[in-house]
Every structure is written in structure tokens, then in C-alpha cells.
Amino acid sequence: MVQKSDLPFGSEFSPSQIELPELLDLAMTHAGDVKALQAAIQARFFSTHGAGNAKNQATLAMNCRLGMKAYGLIDEDANPTDFGRRLHSLRNNESKLYEALARHILLNLKGMALVQCIRDMTAAGEVVNLTTLRSGLAERGIHYPSGGKADTNLSIVMIDRTDLNEIRSYPTHVVDAFNREARHAMTLKQLDL
């Protein structure tokens, strides 16, 4: 059996794919109904994706739902978690919404360990890429599998020295770096590299 990643999956749960306030509304509206939530996600965010193929669109919607679960917004049955409800209550204040999400990623989803790993590697003059970062994470006891979507997902969090300096001064700015890198990752994904 393949070991599950210690970092959350979320390629379709990305700022380049969804609008978080709207996604949170959908989660509340369709609480407890996996099929209805996925259908609503598909209709709202993925109806023009997947080369018009409904099956591909449904897969994207399912991956988005799984990303919501991985990030702790909903449970297995699509019920909003306490954290998901808290984010929903902040949906009309985007700065507070994304600050709460960034704090959650940093403190509860090994985000701080990821940022520290990148900081340490950068300070040591090491090249930071998917392969070296995976090794650096493994040295810290964080498993991140290689290949497939895992590499695309991890590329979302590849940040540079400027980002690190900004994050060091303003930790909540990690969301800006993640958002920017999500856009870059989606461009790479579209190029099918």
C-alpha cells in the first residue's frame, strides 16, 4: 500500500480554480450531501473545463471536494467542520478569511514545517526544487510521494527568496505566495509538462 502524503492534496482546491467564499457557500447549502455538493461545484467552477467532457468535469469537482476535506473544511460526508463554518462566517471579509486559512495551513497542516524547510535549504545555499524539497521534507519526517498530481501540488508551494523574506516579516502573506504559485502551477499543468 502506498503511504498517504503528510501534506494536503488540493490541486482543484486552488485559487486559480475556485473562489473560496462561493465554495464555502456551496458547502453550507449542500451540507451532508456529497453528490449535491460535487454537482454544485462542477456547475459553478468546472462546467467549462475538461474539454467539455462531463466525466472529466465531475472528476475535477470530486478532487475539489477532496481538497476541501484534506484542508479540513468539510468531513467525509460533506458536512462543514467547525473550521469550515468559521471560514464561512468570514467569507465577506477576504483578508480575514485568507488570514484564517493561512494560519490553519501553517499551524495545522504542516505548512510551517514546509516553509521552514524551504528557509533552511535556501539559507544552506541548496537548490530548492521538487526533488530536493521532497528530500528535505523527508529529513524532517514529512512524507510527500513523488510523481503524478503530488508533484503538481507541491509545485504550488514553491516560493522564492523574496517570498521568504516577506513571509518572515508578515507570516500571513504566505497566502499571497501560495496564490501566485498556484497560478504558475496551473499554467504548467495546462502546458502538460
Image (tube, helix red, strand yellow):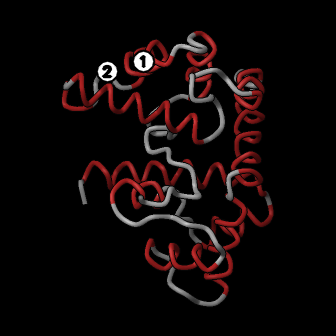
Specify few, some or many for label 1: CA neighbours under 10 Å numbering under 14, 14-19, or 20 or more.
some
1 and 2 marks in contact (CB < 8 Å): yes
- Amino acid type at circle 1 is Arg
Q: CA distance from mark 1 to mark 2?
A: 7 Å
- Amino acid type at circle 2 is Ser
Specify few, some or many for label 2: CA neighbours under 10 Å numbering under 14, 14-19, or 20 or more.
many
Q: In the figure, residue 152 lies in which quadrant?
A: bottom left
Q: Which residue is mark 1?
A: 44
Rendered location of residue 32, percent (x, y): 59, 15
Left or right relative to 39: residue 55: left
Rendered location of residue 8, percent (x, y): 56, 50
Left or right relative to 188: residue 121: right
Residue 18, placed above or below residue 169: above
Q: For the point 56% across and 23% down, which residue is it?
A: 23
Rendered location of residue 78, percent (x, y): 57, 22
Q: Which mark is residue 4?
A: none
Q: In terms of secondary structure, where does tag 2 sit? A: loop
Q: Nearer the viewer, residue 185 or 9?
A: 9
Extreme-top residue of the structure: 29
Q: Nearer the viewer, residue 24 or 94?
A: 24
Q: Which residue is mark 2?
A: 47
